[in-house]
Image (cartoon, rainbow, N blue to C red):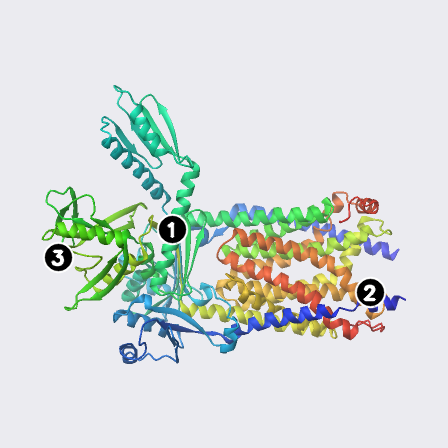
């Protein structure tokens, strides 16, 4: 009796979690359509200069010193770290020479200016890179789907895929909401999220597959709950250690890795939850039962198909 | 009975240990130079280097190398900072040393015997080392247009030869239109056209409409032309970059008509851009008042000359910049046999006449199109018969002479290049990025090791050994893999795979714990844990591997840098986490019949 009560509650938790995940996903889609992704230089094209100017003056003070013709064109921005400044410009026609602009700024401010980073991206390249990034995400999803379709029953495969999709959408929604610059590093982060989230969902699905195959397998709900319980400490440890290392990246990785580590942090967090709320509930909703796997066992015994 | 079974199962054969040891020793050996680090250096490739003037120049400017290494073919000056390395090169160039004889290099601090075994540090990406990256596009229309124009020219000459008149020929980008006279029998024209346009591959597709014939370049021929053009530009760019003295540069094709150039250590990309992007050529013309070709010289005077050049730049085999007796800059030129004969014949018949040197450069115009800019750089009177060696004077400065000689040596680009993207990162920022990445890695590693030790106790230290080996293996693999470069996202990939590598051991250890809880012996639980976790580990890692491989094949730049460490990390964590840990666990606990609950 006690046992039944317990399994019922876990199933309830899972379905409550599923509802929450659905709501969060919808919310992310709405946020994405309202705020839109804040596309970085990689995708929009343009000029970004990172300067080092040792001064105690504020941005407004520096900008007023810059001679009037230059000030219409260039605005210095504080980069969050003392002595580091940013200049952002829209895509230039041709022949933009960063060093000359820096010389001019240095002359106007009467301060030494060191150019630490120059990025000049043409608008066409930006559009190409964006396409390339999306193509990479799409191609990876297709390749993974094919593999899952081979290794798992179709309902389980769909569950795993949906949970991965859910993580990517929520990560994107949060990036849009917080207006974090969407650049190539974020795409790398998203791919890492996909990889991690897959890992997580597969570990649970794998255990469920084992349980369903065993001759004592009965109720799909019980099997799901068992699989989650059996993998729970592993799930916590792995996401804990991964979150720990990713936090190290957030802390020490500096500004250059911020967007990557932030995406990853959110993705790992959401991915851990979704492996339980989505990957292990969707197949139930789709009507997966123990027979689906046990039928195939019979085929195995006949020697028609060997691998599953 | 059951105990015996697991005894056999928990045993790895000698060759497996041998193989494991071999893998471990190899990769950790090749990872070592990376930990020694490297320092910026300048290679001097001329005779009697670091013996006279060059040493004085640097000493006067208070630049002294930390170490000087003399070898048969070069002298290497090792500096403590990239700033010194850059300044030294600049100073020597300003004092007349040829930039192709000064190479920017990096000197590995690892012992010599390691280097002689081919062990080298990981190649660092531009975001970590500092440098410039350029993405350029080859103007493919230009290549095709050139080809079409050539056909139009040939047809015109051939018609003239056969005395066939009354035709108009126009050349568009990829087609030639010929309008034949309506009044005459057109078969002689057709015969010539057929003769000029049919090849083995049937390059031209013709379409006839009464007396109008359109010849269009076939798709395959068009692609071949573009492909050849881009490949040729690629090799010319490689030569030019070599002339600039950048040793570790990479020049790669990207897409159909893109070329990506990475120049480590080059912090001011302007010089590189000028040299790389310039489609420059040199030609010699006969100056004549009746000539219909008019160009301006440096003082904006108009010079009339013959339309056909006496000699064009393709015959130049060598060009060197120097100063003449009066200290004026000049470029000495050496021609090939055909060029020499042509020049010899022309100058013999034209002593006392004037000859002009025309420099043509293609540059991006504000509207994005490419414009040819031709200028007469000198007009000289032919004093005597010229052979295959002569000099060009009339240049403004020594640096102009150097740039011109560099361009001539490396050959003219077959089509103009357009710069699409330019990124450069200063040396200090590169250093900061390395520091940031590695402190994250160190912090993550230490935290994880502590956790594993606390959580798994006896098995924890085995997991730690696996983690360290995993990192060594990844570094070794990266250093060995040709073309693999460590970037900042790559370090992020290292950190991430270290975080995820633990998963392999967690999966196995948790299964072992499960079995022990159910009351199995330790030996039995170990066997069960490894066997049952393997399928899961395999499924989970393979899917991540798939996404990483896709990312590597489609992506570029940071995406590839991240994908490569992820791929290597997955492979090495499979080896160390599954195979490596078992090699340690088997002999220690593999026969234990204890029923320890806490492992």
Mark 3 vs 2, N-terminal side? 3
Q: Quadrant of residue B143?
A: top left
Q: Residue furthest top?
A: B183
User: Which of A260/B232 is in front?
Assistant: B232
Residue at 24 percent of width and 27 percent of height:
B164
Determine which residue is flagged by label 3: B384
Give the foreground label among 3 and 2: 3
**Front one among B34 and A20:** B34
Q: Quadrant of the N terminus of chain B?
A: bottom right
Q: Residue B38: horizontal and vertical position, in percent? A: 46, 74
Badge 1: few (under 14), some or many (20 or more) residues near its Cα, within 10 Å?
some
- CA distance for labels 1 and 2: 65 Å
Residue under numbered circle 2 = B515
Q: State the image quarter where residue B187 is shown.
A: top left
Q: Sequence-wise, which precedes: disc 1 or disc 2?
A: 1
Q: Which residue is disc 1 drawn over?
A: B232
The numbered mark, 1 or 3, whose residue comes first in the sequence reads 1
Mark 3 and mark 1 in contact (Cβ < 8 Å)? no
In the image, B109: left or right of B391?
Answer: right
CA separation in Å, label 3 and label 2: 99 Å
Asked which secondary structure carries label 1, the reply is helix
Contact between labelled residues 2 and 1, with CB atoms less than 8 Å apart: no
Q: SS class of the residue under badge 2?
A: helix
**SS of the residue at dot 3?**
loop
Label 3: how many Cα within 10 Å (few below 14, some 14–19, many 20+): few
* Numbered disc in front, either 1 or 3: 3
């Amino acid at each position: 009796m006690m046992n039944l009560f317990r399994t019922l509650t876990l199933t309830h938790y899972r379905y409550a979690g599923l509802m929450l995940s659905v709501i969060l996903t919808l919310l992310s889609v709405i946020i994405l359509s309202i705020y839109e992704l804040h596309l970085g230089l990689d995708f929009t094209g343009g000029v970004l200069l990172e300067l080092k100017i040792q001064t105690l003056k504020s941005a407004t003070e520096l900008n007023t010193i810059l001679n009037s013709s230059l000030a219409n064109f260039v605005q210095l921005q504080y980069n969050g770290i003392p002595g580091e400044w940013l200049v952002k410009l829209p895509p230039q026609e041709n022949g933009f020479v960063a060093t000359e602009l820096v010389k001019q700024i240095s002359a106007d401010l009467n301060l030494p200016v060191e150019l630490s980073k120059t990025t000049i991206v043409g608008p066409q390249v930006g559009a190409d890179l964006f396409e390339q990034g999306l193509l990479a995400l799409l191609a990876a999803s297709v390749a993974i789907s094919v593999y899952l379709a081979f290794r798992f029953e179709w309902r389980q495969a769909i569950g795993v895929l949906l949970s991965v999709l859910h993580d990517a959408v929520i990560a994107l929604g949060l990036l849009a909401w917080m207006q974090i610059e969407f650049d190539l590093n974020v795409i790398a982060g998203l791919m890492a999220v996909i990889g991690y989230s897959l890992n997580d969902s597969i570990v649970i699905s794998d255990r469920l597959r084992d349980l369903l195959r065993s001759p004592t397998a009965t109720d799909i709900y019980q099997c799901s709950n068992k699989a989650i319980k059996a993998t729970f400490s592993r799930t916590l440890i792995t996401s804990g250690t991964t979150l720990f290392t990713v936090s190290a990246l957030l802390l020490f990785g500096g500004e250059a890795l911020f967007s990557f580590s932030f995406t990853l942090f959110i993705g790992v967090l959401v991915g851990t939850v979704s492996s339980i709320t989505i990957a292990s509930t969707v197949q139930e909703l789709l009507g997966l039962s123990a027979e689906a796997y046990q039928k195939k066992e019979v085929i195995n015994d006949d020697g028609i198909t060997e691998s599953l | 009975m059951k105990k015996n079974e697991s005894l056999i199962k928990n045993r790895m054969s000698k060759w497996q240990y041998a193989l494991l040891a071999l893998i471990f020793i190899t990769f950790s050996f090749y990872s070592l130079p990376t930990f020694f680090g490297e320092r910026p250096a300048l290679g001097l490739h001329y005779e009697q280097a670091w013996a006279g003037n060059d040493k004085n120049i640097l000493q006067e400017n208070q630049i002294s190398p930390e170490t000087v290494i003399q070898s048969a073919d070069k002298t290497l000056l090792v500096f403590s900072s990239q700033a010194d390395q850059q300044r030294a090169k600049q100073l020597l160039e300003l004092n007349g040393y040829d930039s192709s004889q000064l190479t920017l290099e990096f000197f590995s601090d690892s012992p010599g015997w390691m280097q002689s075994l081919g062990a080298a540090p990981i190649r660092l990406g531009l975001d970590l080392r500092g440098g410039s990256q350029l993405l350029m596009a080859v103007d493919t229309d230009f290549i095709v247009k050139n080809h079409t124009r050539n056909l139009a020219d040939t047809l015109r000459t051939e018609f003239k030869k056969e005395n066939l008149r009354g035709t108009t020929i126009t050349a568009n980008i990829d087609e030639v239109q010929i309008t034949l006279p309506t009044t005459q029998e057109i078969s002689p024209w057709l015969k010539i056209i057929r003769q000029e346009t049919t090849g083995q591959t049937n390059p031209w597709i013709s379409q006839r409409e009464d007396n109008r014939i359109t010849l269009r370049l076939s798709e395959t021929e068009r692609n071949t032309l573009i492909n050849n053009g881009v490949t040729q530009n690629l090799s010319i760019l490689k030569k030019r970059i070599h002339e600039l003295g950048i040793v570790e540069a990479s020049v790669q094709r990207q897409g159909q008509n893109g070329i990506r150039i990475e120049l480590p250590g080059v912090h001011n990309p302007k010089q590189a851009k000028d040299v790389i992007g310039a489609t420059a050529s040199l030609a010699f013309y006969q100056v004549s008042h009746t000539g219909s070709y008019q160009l301006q010289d440096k003082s904006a005077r108009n010079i009339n000359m013959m339309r056909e050049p006496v000699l064009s730049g393709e015959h130049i085999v060598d060009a060197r910049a120097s100063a003449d007796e009066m200290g004026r800059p000049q470029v000495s030129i050496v021609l090939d046999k055909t060029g020499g004969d042509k020049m010899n014949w022309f100058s013999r018949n034209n002593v006392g006449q004037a000859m002009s040197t025309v420099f043509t450069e293609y540059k991006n115009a504000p509207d994005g199109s490419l414009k040819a800019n031709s200028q007469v750089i000198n007009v000289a009177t032919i004093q005597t018969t010229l052979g295959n060696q002569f000099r060009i004077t009339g240049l403004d400065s020594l640096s102009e002479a150097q740039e011109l000689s560099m361009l001539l040596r490396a050959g003219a680009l077959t089509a103009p290049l357009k710069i699409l993207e330019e990124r450069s990162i200063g040396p200090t920022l590169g250093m900061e990025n390395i520091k940031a990445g590695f402190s994250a890695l160190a912090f993550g590693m230490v935290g994880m090791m502590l956790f594993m030790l606390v959580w798994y106790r006896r098995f924890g230290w085995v997991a730690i050994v696996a983690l360290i080996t995993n990192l060594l293996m990844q570094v070794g693999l990266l250093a060995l893999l040709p073309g693999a470069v460590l970037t900042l996202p790559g370090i992020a990939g290292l950190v991430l795979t270290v975080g995820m590598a633990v998963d392999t051991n967690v999966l196995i250890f948790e299964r072992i714990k499960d079995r022990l809880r159910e009351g199995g012996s330790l030996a039995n639980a170990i066997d069960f844990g490894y066997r049952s976790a393997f399928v899961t580990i395999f499924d989970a890692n393979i899917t991540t591997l798939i996404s990483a491989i896709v990312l590597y094949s489609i992506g570029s730049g940071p995406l590839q840098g991240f994908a490569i460490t992820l791929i290597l990390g997955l492979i090495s964590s499979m080896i160390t986490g599954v195979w490596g840990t078992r090699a340690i666990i088997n002999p220690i606990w593999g026969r234990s019949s204890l029923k320890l609950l806490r492992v």
